Amino acid sequence: MPSEDADIPSDISTRHIYSRELVVVVSPQHPLARQTSVSLDDVAGERLILTSPEEAPRLVVDRAFRAHGFEPHVSFEADDPATLIGLAADGIAIGITGENIARRYSDRVVSLRVDGLRMRMRYSLALAWSDRGPHTRAMASFLDFATVWLADWGTRTQAESVTSAEAIR
């Protein structure tokens, strides 16, 4: 979901799993790497690595850019976090990804908070189901299991590290 307060239809129930702040990731050699935070003005003219338009992080980024009168200059789309990090680490472009992912790769990229936003760049993972169907014990058990499993999955990365842009060609 693009945010915790996403507009959900009234006949859909959700169970929030986690939320993540999005941060900018740059190569340690990038001029922005000397800063601790950036504004959208700082990154608006940069070539960006973002997730595909269907992914919640991209929806959040696109919305934030448009709210500030910018259109993101997307050079690459990478739904795999390790690929996004690998491209940013190699200085191909700058990326925007979840803070936990950026923290895991702090040996390869510098992560920067985005300040001065009208709305925070944050996305959420949630389970969603229709209120129209039957609510069985099996469904309740599945939701309980999926909640625990996804929360644990959210603390790890499922992607293998990419060491350079060469590795993804």
Image (cartoon, helix red, strand yellow):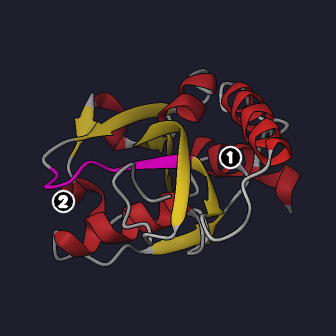
Q: Which residue is mark 2?
A: 41
Mark 2 falls on what kind of element? helix
Please give the name of the residue rendered at 49% of the width and 47% of the height, measured from the top-left corner.
124
Pick whichever of labels 2 and 1 is earlier in the sequence: 2
- The picture places residue 28, in percent across and down from the top left corner, at 48, 32
Above or below — where is 119 with respect to 26? below
Residue depth check, mark 2 versus mark 1: number of the one nearer the observer: 1
Q: Quadrant of residue 143?
A: top right
Q: Is residue 48 visible?
A: no
Question: What stretch of residues is rendered in magenta?
Answer: 117-125
Q: CA distance from mark 2 to mark 1?
A: 24 Å
Q: Is residue 38 left or right of residue 79?
A: left
Residue 90 is covered by the magenta coloring:
no
Q: Nearer the viewer, residue 144 or 137?
A: 137
Amino acid identity at mark 2: Asp
- The picture places residue 58, in percent across and down from the top left corner, at 49, 65
Q: Is residue 43 left or right of residue 78?
A: left
Q: Determine contact: label 2, label 1, CB under 8 Å.
A: no
Counting other residues with Cα less than 10 Å from the Cα at mark 1, is it few (<14), some (14-19), or many (20 or more)? many
Q: Mark number for residue 89? A: none
Look at the image and tell me in which quarter the C terminus lies.
bottom right
Q: Which residue is mark 1?
A: 81
Amino acid identity at mark 1: Pro
Q: Is residue 53 left or right of residue 59?
A: right
